[in-house]
Image (cartoon, rainbow, N blue to C red):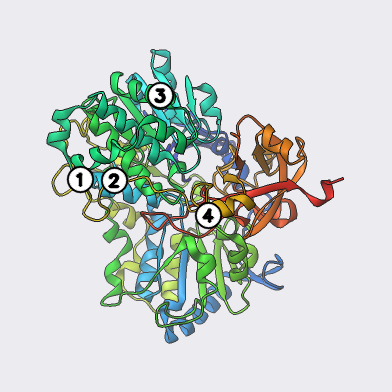
Amino acid sequence: MNQLVTVRGACPHDCPDTCALRVTVQDGRAIKVQGDPEHPPTHGALCTKVSRYTERVYHPQRVLHPVRRSGPKGSGRFERVAWDEALDDIAARMAAIAARDPEAIVPYSYAGTMGLLQGESMDRRFFHRLGASLLDRTICSNAGGEALLATYGAKIGMHLEHYAESKLIVIWGSNSIASNLHFWTFAQAAKRNGAKLVCIDPRKTETADKCHQHIAVLPGTDGALALGLMHELVVNDWLDHDYIERHTEGWPALRERALQWPPERTAEVCGISADEVRGLARDYATTAPAAIRLNYGMQRVRGGGNAVRLIAILPCLIGAWRHRAGGLLLSSSGWFPVDRAALQRPDLLGPRRPRTINMSTIGNELLRESSPAFGPRIEALVVYNSNPVAVAPESPKVVQGFAREDLFTVVLEQFMTDTADHADYVLPVTTQLEHLDVHTSYGHSYALVNEPAIAALGEARPNTAVFRELARRMGFDDPCFADSDEDMARVAFSKDVSLDGLRVTGWTRLPLPDAPLADGQFRTPSGKCLIDSPQFGVPDYVPNYESAASTPELARRYPLAMISPPARNFLNSSFVNVQSLRDIEGEPLVEIHASDAQARGIVDGAMVRVFNDRGSYLCKAQLSARARPGVVNGLGVWWRKLGAGGTNVNEVTHQQLTDIGRAPSFYDCLVEVRPAPSAQP
């Protein structure tokens, strides 16, 4: 037969690029996934991970049939069951729990897909109608996201393509080569045209290698650096007074605060030199257009929200927003006119106001008993688009909670992840090549459509279909549960974007000005950048929970700061089981500076134990200049069962939350590293 067709798609994964895809299908089988060269912001390139997407779709260990647990939780022992049997039992057990208290049922999902249909439509309708606990989805970006809301009024920023015209680009908290490839392409174009690139990151990343300058701040000190830069802008009068006057509120109070941060103080706190502070401030103030590409790594500390607010104010102080190639981008998602009320139907709650469970503290929440303050003990958990046993902080408690025999757990998955191993039922769901979806982006301003390229493999079903069937079995006869995926796609956007329009080319560019904040027009009530926020006040440097300065006694026992950025060829815990990508990564690593290794008798390639009071995990040490003295880099996020001793880096992270956004502070963590017992003489 040899029928060859190409289908338009969109990358579903938690990455700012949101690439347009072209999927080549031969006789019903996807044989190639490529970037669409006609898509302006991503211009046909794909990261290594997604370019191998067919390996994931046709993986020999793909879950293709419903299974029910037949052994102890965590054992991975399951038996195959029919869909009807599984859904009937799940619905019956959930109905019994709901009859006592529906808030004892908790959904748990995040960005396993970023699609509006498979990520946040029929599932939300189901749980709203049920009256289940709400989920505070905070685990990745909430500190920075809420900081932008408090400052700009929305998660908005400059256009990705215009970085190619910038003359100074500050890449702050982002390993763009690994996690924001298409931004990096535009940054490289700017570099060829004479732009200076500066990377601010505790780790000497692959991106830092390619920049003109790397400023290796200590973890959690980004807010102090922003204040130090402001000090120099003030004392040298490198300010755009007109922009500040017309388009900001609250600058006088922050000006006084910044004057308390001369370069010497800033340098001491950040672990850098005073000349680095002065030089960066001079470059930023005197090079136009100047742009900042901020990413979410730097906000995963106690003071992450305040740090994002301070950095987001910097472009306003020098009037960088006047230029289309100036300003800042952390997220562009606030530009998209998504109609979440139509998709998610919160009106199905009626007068009920269920409690909210924070996904970042699921380890604590699963172990809590019923109480007037907490509400009912969690009796059932439905997990989809996430792998919390691997990715949630302080995993010893997460595992303990998921191992509860009295916890009824349903997991919708493509693979037997660490979380799926603890499920009572695992239901097979489709990949991006097998279902319809529509997408926004947090790295550019183009909406996209994803058409199903192939039929669903085995008995896999889209998330939407699973929740539609559960609703029917629960007796939910509201008309919205009969909506098809195409019906929901047609109401996903309130304006400017239509499904029919998306289907013409695969994407639609939002109708935004080239320099969207040149004349202010922030999304705040006043239209100005809020420096003095009604909710959070004037931003300030907030030190880490755990550091030599904040907790000196703890630092004497655990003297190394640890950050846990993603391994280059994984995306959080996605792709970890793709063999070709795991072959590239090798095995779990902790990068450690040679001086720290020598002081501990650690040699390159040795197995080591990374530990603190919360737990310990085993991995291989790599002596590396990518680690600065006093800081180790525990690359993640490996599935626990693929790591040494069945553990990963989240054994040692904690569940304390950020200053803004109630988000996890993964990179705010003190540890010690020692040779593993078997490696000691």
- Identify the residue at horizontal 65%, vertical 38% (top origin): 591
Residues at marks 1 and 2 touching, judged by CB atoms closer than 8 Å: yes
Residue type highlighted by circle 2: Gly
In percent of width and height, residue 66 lies at: 60, 66
Measure the alpha-carbon separation of dots 1 and 3. Answer: 27 Å
Query: Which badge, 3 or 4, comes first in the chain's sequence?
Result: 3
- For label 4, the residue is 430
Q: Earlier in the sequence, mark 2 or mark 4?
A: 2
Tag 2: Cα neighbours inside 10 Å, few (<14), some, or many (≥20)? many
| Residue 141 in the image, given as x and y percentages of width and height | 41, 49
Spatial separation of the CA atoms under disc 3 and disc 4? 33 Å
Q: CA distance from mark 2 to mark 4?
A: 28 Å
The kind of residue on which mark 3 rests is: Phe
Q: CA distance from mark 4 to mark 1?
A: 37 Å
Q: Are marks 3 and 2 in contact (CB under 8 Å)?
A: no
Look at mark 1 in the image and give the residue it sits on.
523
Residue 334's tag is 2
Label 1 vs 3, first from the N-terminus: 3
